[in-house]
DNA sequence: GATGAATGAGCATTCATTCAT
DNA sequence: AATGAATGAATGCTCATTCAT
């Protein structure tokens, strides 16, 4: 058996077992059995249970980053573009979580084990960084309000993480994830307050009859 | 020694130790030592390490619910009132987390141990329920947009939980929590999009020169 | 409360609890509760759980010895007298066991705890000694065959102990104990073999037409 | 190391240690050491200390049953045949107990631990069943008196068990077990009473000069 | 005498890891 | 590379006993 095939089978089995039982209640023997190898074999490919766990988390984190990387980020000229791109991103991320509920739960909310907290922190911070970059770029281009970028980026990530954790991982929702993404984005972009309640000063200039020209939002480097 | 005093000392010590080490790495002996009692004494007050852990989480969850219960919820006549009340709520909650970083981290993101998942789920769902009620009451009164209440309530809770987890528990921020709350509320209420970019149809009626009268928001039953 | 009353209540409660649970599964707390006193009080009257157990056993052993002491042992002139006296003894002993199944079981078959083995051994050996003495006196008087006294005495005691243990303690038989005693005695005295199968040499002398005179059996000192 | 070899070593070591200390005072660590393995190894072969104990008892009970199974039970045509066969059985059983004093003591008189009481009860009842069957067959063939089979069978078993427990296990007698068996059988078959004291009606018919023909005792199914 | 909260030594069991085959 | 039997350190929990009140 080609070595890397065994390693992959172990990662798959570990994702399964860790996902179902959590780190502490998962037994190395169970993972080995699920992978169809002997217990000792696990240690040919991974130094320890902890490293194996980290590898499982890392693989999922990488997949999440891959989702963002595959989105076409250029040509955002309006809030509608922005909304469409992010709807794609959210939907793809939700679908990834829906297909990997167990591991997604561990990455988003598992106990600190070895470097697991760092893996989670890196994923969260990478995501916050992207968010921050777009908020700043959006503010610069005039599309978005000039909010305090860091805490708002964090809020946006939290909103996503929490929805993924509860609606998708815990409750197991797998359908209509696109609509879910759009509802969240509608909230993010336009807020809760009814337009009729907006202070006049915030109203779009009626005179021009159209929105002031906002420059296109160049994809920020993240 | 009065029994409840010992029980309280144990809860305090357990919160300390569980908070610092997490459930699995905390030793009962360590908790006993921290409480200044013998190991066996722990079992006079708590059936097991697991039950003690649950009691610690439950006490914190109760404190969080108490924060919401102490807010004066009536007399919300405008989005400004709404904002003020929620700013109080957010600030008080953040301060509670800041004063109990260890336990807050466990409640918001610890591993599933015994009934811990249910305790967390109940806290989250209670909070989501309050949020949902206000969203619906706000929409009914005309103050808020008629959004899909459940997912948006969840998003709002997620935004809070994530901020508490990362900014307060993980990073240890303890100052300016009031400003943090206000920034989040500003985002929640008005969204990201610059007013200039809002679609004209959503603009406040210019003719009237003022916002249409919205009825006062009666405190919903939660 | 008069001290000895408390001590007696403790002995009663301990007999109850030890009888129901056995030594190792009985809790001192349970005995205290059954006696209606606090745990510490047990230690005012008994040095330890072990000594309390021994006291319970000793009290029962004493009662068994008392049964034998109350039988009128003189005037045994025939095997019929012998049979009647022993039937009384067996019946009274069986009834004592029936009224104290729990403790009887412990005395006859409990685990070795502290001096419990010695208490049992003393009771068994006292009983064997009585039996031996009667076998020897019986043989001397010509009523009984000159068997090897010690092993046969032991066999007789074993037959009693086993019947008490299984028929009375384990199966809970409480009625007709007198008939049970008689059946056992019939077996002891006349054996299994059908008279028709007895070897001629053992037959009573036909010439005399009657049994040879046997002297009365004087109660042996035991 | 072949698995069953380790299991056997553990059983041997456990028999040794349990026999010497009893269940409650035996330490798993001691058994492991006696078997020359690590503590954890015990749990590869036995679920718990309790199961190991049961296995030890069961193995001995099986050996006792094996003794009875190896006796040639056919061709019993007289009380002499009967006596010879049972002398063999008793002797072999006594020798088994003499070679395994520790375990024999536990099987015959240990505390109730897990299923130990059931193991003992099954052994006792199997033995009583065999005894009952022979008593009934003996009575049917005319060799034995028509006694109440069940209580007498129990008495016989008790006599054996008690002798094994005290003479062999406790006192450690290992020699002359054959004679011991014969003494017991003599008592069982012919009873205590001197032939001269037997009631005339029970005397063998003098006219025939010999015992009436009794039919052969066919081995009962047990 | 009586209480019962507190004590802490003691032990079965688990399971990640190793290594001879 | 693969195996899986063996390892043994580590720890939650029990409960007889004590002693301040």
Image (cartoon, coloured by chain):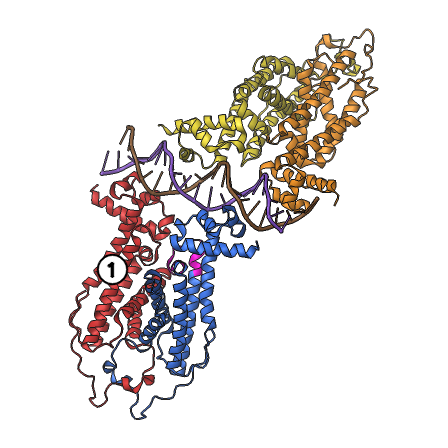
Chain colours: A red, B blue, C orange, D yellow, E brown, F purple
Give the structural element (helix, strand or loop) at label 1: helix
Q: Quadrant of residue D222?
A: top right
Give the image location of residue A95, x and y in percent.
28, 62
Side (left or right) of B46 relative to C143: left
| A200 shown above or below A191 | below
Stretch of the chain drawn in magenta: B105-119
Of B192 and A82, the residue lying toward us: B192
Q: Magenta-highlighted stretch: main secondary structure?
A: helix
Q: Residue at x 19, y 89 (%)?
A: A208
Q: How many marks?
A: 1
Subunit bearing disc 1: A
Q: Quadrant of residue A39?
A: top left
Q: Quadrant of residue A212?
A: bottom left
Side (left or right) of A173 relative to D109: left
Give the image location of residue A201, x and y in percent.
28, 86
Give the image location of residue D171, x and y in percent.
60, 19
Of B175 and A163, the residue lying toward us: B175
Q: Residue at x 21, y 41 (%)?
A: A1
Residue topped by disc 1: A64
- Is B118 a magenta residue? yes
Side (left or right) of C85 relative to A54: right
């Amino acid at each position: 058996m080609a070595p890397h095939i065994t390693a992959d089978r172990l990662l798959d089995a570990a994702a399964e077992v860790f996902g179902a039982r959590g780190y502490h209640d998962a037994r190395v023997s169970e993972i080995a059995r699920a992978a169809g190898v002997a217990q000792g074999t696990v240690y040919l490919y991974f130094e320890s249970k902890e490293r194996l766990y980290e590898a499982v988390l890392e693989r999922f984190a990488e997949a999440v980053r891959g989702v963002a990387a595959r989105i076409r980020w250029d040509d955002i000229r309006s809030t509608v573009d922005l909304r469409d791109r992010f709807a794609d991103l959210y939907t793809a991320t939700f679908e990834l979580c829906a297909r990997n509920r167990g591991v997604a739960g561990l990455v988003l909310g598992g106990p600190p084990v070895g470097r697991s907290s760092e893996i989670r922190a890196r994923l969260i911070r990478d995501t916050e960084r992207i968010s921050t970059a777009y908020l700043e770029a959006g503010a610069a281009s005039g599309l978005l309000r000039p909010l305090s970028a860091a805490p708002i980026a964090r809020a946006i990530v939290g909103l996503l993480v929490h929805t993924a954790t509860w609606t998708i991982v815990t409750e197991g929702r797998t359908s209509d994830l696109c609509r879910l993404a759009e509802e969240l984005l509608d909230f993010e972009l336009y807020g809760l307050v009814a337009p009729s309640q907006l202070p006049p000063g915030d109203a779009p200039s009626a005179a021009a009859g159209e929105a002031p020209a906002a420059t296109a939002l160049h994809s920020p480097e993240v």
